[in-house]
Image (tube, rainbow, N blue to C red):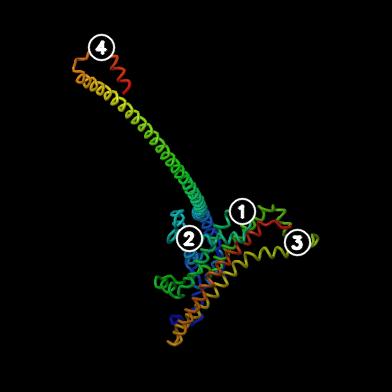
Amino acid sequence: MASEYHSSGEYIKHHLQNLTYGQHVDGTWGFAHGAEEAKAMGFWAINVDSMLFSIGLGVLFLFFFRMAAKRATVGVPAGLQNFVEWVIEFIDSTVRGSFSHRNALVAPLALTVFMWVFLMNMMDLIPVDWLPYAASMAGVPYLKVVPSTDPNVTFGMSLSIFVLVLYYSVKMKGAGGFFSELAFQPFPKFLFPVNLLLEGVGLIAKPISLALRLFGNMYAGEMIFILIALMFGGSWILALFGGVLQWAWAVFHILIITLQAFIFMTLTIVYLDMAHAEHH
Amino acid sequence: MNFNATLIGQSVTFIFFVWFCMKFVWPPIMNALETRKKQIADGLAAGDRGKHELELAAKKAADKLREAKAQAGEVIAQADKRAAQIIEEAKMAAKEEGDRQLAAAQANIAQETNRARESLRDQVAALAVAGAEKILRREVNAQTHAELLGQLKAEL
């Protein structure tokens, strides 16, 4: 399919471009054509594909889980309920293992993070050209189907979690306690500017690393799928080899998408646990 | 990397999803899990209790059986004893009755003998009188000779 593009560079760029809606430089509203136009729209533009896919997947997750919750019986579980209970018990045991305080928010938060990130990552397993090609047939110029390759999505989650971390830090330790945690350790009190700098960086690094880790892994994985897809434009031997590679990478990717979802969830739990912990 | 309002949209969406999950998904399922866990634990405990009770009942049954056997043995022994006693009593009674009947029969016999002897005496006396009459060839006045006859009777 790369043959429809003038160069492989263009093909890759096209695949990495979100469908962005916003105000053009000339004042009209519409979809951006190309990365430069999207950039020129500034902050008040929205990646329609990211929003649609992420909301769709989140609704899918909540729909099925809500259905299972409604039908939840104490008796022998079957089908959907069995699966949902399996996931919930897995999340619950992870939360119990990493979170040592009482907070009714953390476990549902972890469940949402895990399932949502997992589903968004799973979009990566759909062959890279299918949905964008279908969309281009329907007249949509750009379509990026994996929401977690959009930093807006990962940062949206990690910043929300960061707000929660700050909220619980202040709630559990008080503003003074939180400040002293940042300023009076690890070095003695008179070195508090150094402490503040170190701890401040550590604090800020939490949401950034959380978001960038997921984004980086998914972006790189998607990039490799795109590079493999480029092979389909070559000779049939190359295409066959590409097919084998794509299958192999997809199999390996199943591990990555699960692992990344799990890491995101676990770190969320750990950060919230640290926010609750009184030390020193 | 190109940040735009998607960031805000995602945050809002995320917060909504978490809220929904916390409100409508997690509690009912967790509830069902907890309740089932409790039910299973209760069931297992009840099973254990039942097993224990079964053991107790078996022990009790064995005890009862042993007791019943002992009692039955006792009853049989008692019955045997009683039977022997009854037989003994019956023997005694029979012997007594026999003795009594023997005595009565002997008395009867003696009486009959006496009676027979009496009638024999009378008849012998009458015979003697008749003989004497015949010998004397005359009528003997019974009244005149009553004293003689009585003497004769007494001698017989």
Residue A163 location (% of width, % of height): 62, 58
On the image, numbered disc 3 is attached to which residue? A185
Placement of the C terminus of chain B among the 4 image quadrants:
top left
Between circles 1 and 3, the one closer to the viewer is 1
User: Dot 2, how many residues are within 10 Å of its Cα: few (below 14), some (14-19), or many (20+)?
Assistant: many
Instruction: Specify the label residue A64 is tagged with.
Output: none
**Chain for numbered disc 1:** A
Instruction: Answer with mark 1 or mark 3, whichever residue precedes in sequence.
Output: 1
Marks 4/2: CA distance? Answer: 150 Å
Identify the disc placed on residue A84. Answer: 2
| Amino acid beneath label 1 | Arg
Q: Is residue A104 above or below residue B83?
A: below
Residue sitting at 48 percent across and 70 percent down?
A123
Please report, as a chain letter, where disc 4 is located.
Answer: B
State the residue in front, A275 or A98.
A98
Question: Which residue in the rendered view is the most extreme toward the right?
Answer: A190
Label 3 neighbourhood size at 10 Å, few (<14), some (14-19), many (20+)? some
